Amino acid sequence: MIFKWLFLILLVCLIFWLFKRSGSEQKNSSDTSAEVVENMVRCAYCSVYLPQNESITWSGRSFCCAEHRRLFSQYQQSLHK
């Protein structure tokens, strides 16, 4: 009778260990394929960081929106007057 209980406990532990092990392997394999690294740039007007593909580039500088590009341009023109 005691051997039945020991066998049952051992079987449950084995099933739990296999289930836990297979779950962690799937998690690790999906994490590496989903990780994408993008270059971040800083807006020349407000200094906010944003992904490079979402920025507006003008005259070698990056901006977060067209309004900040326009304001920066006006500011530069006022400095040269």
Image (tube, grey):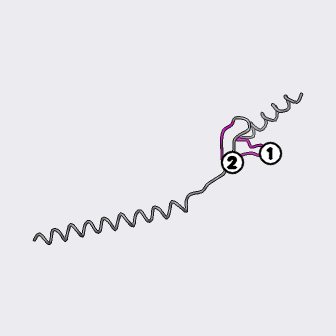
Q: Amino acid at mark 1?
A: Gly
The residue at which mark 2 appears reads as 54
Instruction: Name the residue nearer the viewer: 5 or 70.
Output: 5
Is 53 inside the magenta-drawn segment?
yes
Q: Secondary structure beneath disc 1?
A: loop
Label 1 CA crowd tier, 10 Å (few <14, some 14–19, many 20+): few
Q: Which residues are magenta?
A: 47-64
- Describe residue 64's horizontal placement relative to residue 16 as left or right: right
Q: Nearer the viewer, residue 6 or 48?
A: 6
Task: Work out whether mark 1 precedes mark 2 in sequence or the reverse, and give the earlier one.
Answer: 2
Q: Amino acid at mark 2?
A: Glu
Question: Which residue corresponds to the image point at 26% horizontal and 65% vertical from the top-left?
Answer: 13
Q: Which mark is residue 60?
A: 1
Q: Is residue 13 magenta?
A: no
Residue, x 74% and y 45% (percent of image)?
56
Distance between mark 1 and mark 2 Cα atoms: 15 Å
- The residue under the point 23% across, 68% down is 10
Is the Cβ of the residue at disc 1 closer than 8 Å to that at disc 2? no
The residue at 77%/43% (across/down) is 61
